[in-house]
Image (tube, coloured by chain):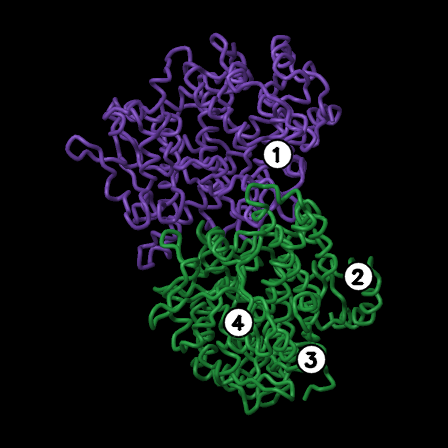
Chain colours: A purple, B green
Amino acid sequence: MSLLKRLISVVAPIAGRIPFTRRLASEYFIDKSGNATSPRPRPFSMAADYTSWESLTDRRFTGRHLPPPKAADQPARPAVEEVLKLFSRQGAGRQAVDTSVLFSAFAQWFTDSFLRTDRSEPRDFRKNTSNHEIDLCEIYGLDAHRTRMLRSMKGGRLRSQLLKDGRGVEGEFPEFLYERVGDQFAIRAAFRNAELGDLHDAALLARVFDGWTDAQKAAVFAVGLEHGNSVIGNTVLNSLFLREHNRIAGELAKTNPDWLTAPDGGDERLFQTARNVLTVLLLKLVVEEYIVHISPIEFPLEMVPFVADGKKWNKSNWIAIEFSLLYRWHSLVPDVISDGQRSLKPAEFLGNNALVISEGIDSLLGLLARAPAGRIGLHNTPVFLEKVEARTLKLMRDADLASYNAYRKAFGLSRLTSFAQLSDDPAVVQELTRLYGTIDKLEWYVGIFAERYDAKSMMGDLMLTMVAYDAFTQALTNPLLARNVYGKDTFSAKGLEIIDNTHRLQDLVNRNCAKPPKVSFEFPKARAG
Amino acid sequence: MSLLKRLISVVAPIAGRIPFTRRLASEYFIDKSGNATSPRPRPFSMAADYTSWESLTDRRFTGRHLPPPKAADQPARPAVEEVLKLFSRQGAGRQAVDTSVLFSAFAQWFTDSFLRTDRSEPRDFRKNTSNHEIDLCEIYGLDAHRTRMLRSMKGGRLRSQLLKDGRGVEGEFPEFLYERVGDQFAIRAAFRNAELGDLHDAALLARVFDGWTDAQKAAVFAVGLEHGNSVIGNTVLNSLFLREHNRIAGELAKTNPDWLTAPDGGDERLFQTARNVLTVLLLKLVVEEYIVHISPIEFPLEMVPFVADGKKWNKSNWIAIEFSLLYRWHSLVPDVISDGQRSLKPAEFLGNNALVISEGIDSLLGLLARAPAGRIGLHNTPVFLEKVEARTLKLMRDADLASYNAYRKAFGLSRLTSFAQLSDDPAVVQELTRLYGTIDKLEWYVGIFAERYDAKSMMGDLMLTMVAYDAFTQALTNPLLARNVYGKDTFSAKGLEIIDNTHRLQDLVNRNCAKPPKVSFEFPKARAG
């Protein structure tokens, strides 16, 4: 395995330059990741600890990769408070080697769309409200009814408004969610529907915006998800993708005049096609830029259409509890977002759409790309996220998961026999020994954050293997990438051209920002601390 | 192709006797059928005549194999009344060569569970209410809430009652749906739920039981589907499968004493496991008895677990409008169900649970198995089903389908160039020529019923290819047959034993009838008219 890795690292840069071998190597790498563990469907979901028709078919219950251990096999585990201490950031924390805050913002924005623990009351930690697809619900909402609320119903466009930034330059943003009625804020009529449901669940929204000032609420945008306004990263990316949607709709209208003769002036077809094109753009960025950044191998991975054809792992998506937990990269978030010139504290980057409006997304995208993220690992969760980390640990315990070594085995990795094999940090080895005794008793969630990794990587072996498995087997099974679907008939010639000409987030930024900043998930290593 | 067929017909009987070659040949035949056309997902559903996220993901819209032709390419077609005349039974009709009425009863009962056109108001012919899975909703209801209504919540059993037949012999049946309140019938409390919904939609039920007498209503059983009481075949099969469910639950309770220590006495696990076992029994009967009967090749096809592993056609199920239409084998239904001794007219076999109760399912299963079905084809729809046939033709026209030859091409068959290639019947050739002019204009739905077939078959080439494709690619993708699921952990040792020991409907009859009759889908050829 290690030899193979070294071989790949030599061959990869050469193979990456030749289209044929690039495609071949991409397919190999994707297929290898997809076969890391056995394919879905799994016999268990969170519905029960035995197999039922419900556990096999009702995706409102979150999936799980491994069944809970038998009660007798689940070792005594340290108190959650003790585990939390393992995650708390020490001092100023550790900085990532080459990852920008834009990466962490993208990760949060992207994963919020499919990692959706059900938060309705009464809480049932076993359930989720995910569509289990990459469907850009961040800007399109969770179902067809809500999508309709977010559309202008003209020209295939999403509802939007032009707002002036501090320098008087206009930028396109989603519409506001609230309107002021007397001294209260009320959801605007467009986003309410007594029969089919409001854009968001009212009780959930009340909790999300609990404690927000009037000024904060006044600037909340109507977007697809409840948490879409929680951090500036979400708002910047929602605005960028909304702009690209409306831009694509305009391009499609110009190039498909026959669509415009429909009774609705072509709105429906333009909307649906623009959405499909934009969703494929997102899938491309995820594979070709986001996953490439995560990967330890320097290789220009390609989103190969039809790559899932006839693959064992090409099965219906089902978000697993482990995927939902392992993606909680709180340690990526710095205490302060700073490019050395300008700094934003949590109070400034949380719930602050006013900042996005006044600075414009151009300026903030640039700042996020120039600021270093934190390093994924133990002792690096920022103080302001400790409550969230504590909730995560609670969920992890409720889910009654198998051990770190059990997951290594399930994902084709060798069992570790000592904490020294896991971590290079003597302090961590000592702490884990004190808390768990032997590595066979180590909890999976602690283990994946304790894993060592080298300077080319941003996470350890098991987390990488599990992320790659779930990402590839659920992103590349997207119906838009299927052989019968991906092509000119679905996207139109113009749509396919846009897909073919998009490879990086930079492309979207260049098309939709007045003064496009340089953006990358990579933070220049030269400057890394 | 024809050579291959002949070769297979020689080799098949030998190969069928050897377990290894039987399994191999089964896998070959299944895979060949699964690759008859390109795999799901399809770019279109009934949602729109272009590809949208909704058309790719919202299975409430019925799927479609081929998109509608461009308006200019859709030829002028004869009036629906003219087409209906092609289907009307002539005289006493034609009898099937070797198919019993039990086969047609099973076909109706089985397909009612997944071919479910949405009949709620306002009607939208594009929609369905199918779960798109073989899930035995005939006895378990359409979702978890309704399943719960049908359970006794003790010992994993379904609600049932013992009723005496005319000779005083007790038999197990579902509970009654209605109770008499004054001079009205009201749904019993167990099957009502104001918040989550009644067992069945009230408006739909009112239409199903429109015109039923008090005596008919008093005998309606509480089963999974609205049409579960419509014909004696449905009631007989519902009762048989309910008995087998409760029998299996009892067997599982005896063999898994540790389950009984759960707070619910084991009810939940017993129920879920019995359901999973029974669902696999159904899948086995469908492949090993029902499809074998349909198949023109004499071969003991085997339900090979994991056969869908890594196959291109192993994709999420989605019932297509063509599947829903081609399965309307009205011509299988005879004017009179008769074994030469005893005869039942439509008024006796429609909506007549009282007969099932008084005769017992043993006696009626025997009668159905001894009575010959009608022959699938044109001019053989019984008079009492002409209204239903007219609705089918209306739906076929609404769906705006491609031509017979277009479907032949899509399913890998050669284009026909004349009506004489289609049918041996000069009268039919003449009629079709008069109505359509050339075969390229022939409607698909008419074509599949006009196709010639030999004495070993029960339908023509295209219908057989399409049935086999949709049946195999949607039955064998059942999650219960997946590699990670099928086995002792899911079914328990006893459950797996029951599965291994079940091959024919006769096995279920022997286990659950006081005086088990001989049952078969095959009507003895010697007696066929």
Q: The residue tagged with tag 1: helix, strand or loop?
A: loop
- Quote the CA–CA distance across marks 4 and 3: 34 Å
Asked if badges 4 and 1 are on one and the same chain, I answer: no
Disc 2 versus disc 3: nearer the observer: 3
Residue beneath the point at 70% across and 24% down = A10
Quarter of the image that includes the C terminus of chain B: bottom right
What is the chain identity of the residue bearing mark 2?
Answer: B
Within 10 Å of disc 1 (Cα), the crowding (few <14, some 14-19, many 20+) is some
**Residue bearing mark 1:** A68
Q: Is residue A359 left or right of residue B226?
A: left
Look at the picture and state if A273 lies above or below B329.
Answer: above
Amino acid on which disc 3 is placed: Phe
Which numbered mark, 2 or 4, is in the foreground of this view?
2
Q: Is residue B265 visible?
A: yes
Q: What separation in Å lies between label 2 and label 1 (alpha carbons)?
A: 38 Å
Q: From the image, tell me which residue sits under label 4.
A: B403
The residue indicated by pointer 3 is B523
B376 and B383: which one is in front? B383
Q: Are marks 2 and 4 in contact (CB under 8 Å)?
A: no
